[in-house]
Image (cartoon, grey):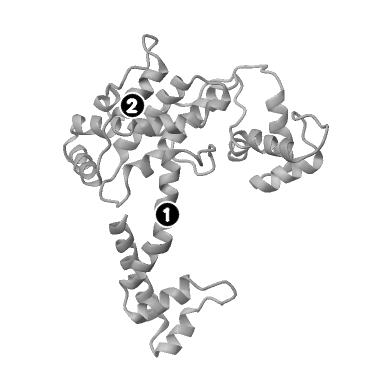
Amino acid sequence: MSHALSQLQFPSLSSSGSIEAYISAANRMPMLSESEELALARRFVASGDIEAARTLVTSHLRLVVAIARGYLGYGLPHADLIQEGNIGLMKAVKRFDPDRGVRLVSFAMHWIKAEIHEYIIKNWRLVKIATTKAQRKLFFNLRSIKASLAQNEDTAQSFGTLTDSNVHHVAQKLGVKPEDVIEMEARFTGGDIALEPGSDEEDDHLAPIAYLTADSSTEPVAVMERKALDHLQDEGLQNALGALDDRSRDIIQRRWLAKDGIAVATLHELADEYGISAERIRQIEVKALQRMKSVLITAA
């Protein structure tokens, strides 16, 4: 992260103010239209305009607040989670490419979550309890799955203990080994016995991680993204298909949108039907997909 970008100032989260006052200030920050966002991002990319970066960051502070709220169950201060999320937001702004056809809100979510995840793992226990991919997946999902099992099962079994069947259920649900579930369960219930050195703090140490997730289904951003996705899958997809000629549309539908129970057409089958080579079918398919992508990006 550039030195100038790291010095950006935000509404205060210091002890002199309350977390409620910060959240209120963050929510009052003006939101940007797509055209405003693109103009500011291009200014920052082209000339390193720090004021453009400041506006991009402050307009998304409410996103950090919403994401951080989903991690309060780990017992860490909300203010600290927000501060770490703000660092992720600044990293996202630095790396944002305004010409990719993606809004900053979607790009920044992954960086914000990655920074918060790393903070939780470093601070939730003195000993690092989640260092591998499987362990991190378990760390951020085991507690919620256990709570669900406890609610669904009519049993006197303690919430803190997993039965053998539950261990296999969790392992299958998360795609990990049963022994990994047992080990993480032991780490959750065990005490801290040593302090390991902290990990490297280099700028590029963190990256967006798809397997670390919080229960953010009710967050405003998540709701908006689901609505946008529904639109793309329905009206947006139909508009994209409508932009193709009849042959290209038929090829895409039979290659990519075949209904359940209908086999996907092969290149050679379509080549025989249209009297052209399989390579030509592939070229038409690639061009059609590019055309559809362009239509979907424009619609978004």
Residue 194 circle label: none
Q: Disc 2 marks which amino acid?
A: Ala
Residue hosting label 1: 229
Crowd around label 2: few <14 · some 14–19 · many ≥20 (10 Å): many
In which image quadrant can residue 270 be found? bottom left
Crowd around label 1: few <14 · some 14–19 · many ≥20 (10 Å): few
Viewer-side residue, 154 vs 102: 154
Q: Is residue 169 above or below residue 202?
A: below
Identity of the residue drawn at 44% across and 40% down: 208
Residue 106 image point, x, y percent? 38, 44
Q: Is residue 44 visible?
A: yes
Q: Quadrant of the N terminus?
A: top left
Residue hosting label 2: 26
Q: Disc 1 marks which amino acid?
A: Leu
In which image quadrant can residue 166 be found? top right
Q: Separation of disc 1 and disc 2 at Cα?
A: 26 Å
Residue 184 image point, x, y percent? 68, 32
Residue 38 image point, x, y percent? 22, 45
Residue 234 image point, x, y percent? 42, 63
Q: Earlier in the sequence, mark 1 or mark 2?
A: 2
Residue placed farthest to the right in the image?
156
Q: Is residue 110 visible?
A: no
In which image quadrant can residue 239 be found? bottom left
190 lies left or right of 268: right
The kind of secondary structure element at disc 1 is: helix
Pointer 1 and pointer 2: residues touching (CB < 8 Å)? no
Q: Quadrant of the C terminus?
A: bottom left
Identity of the residue drawn at 24% across and 29% down: 54
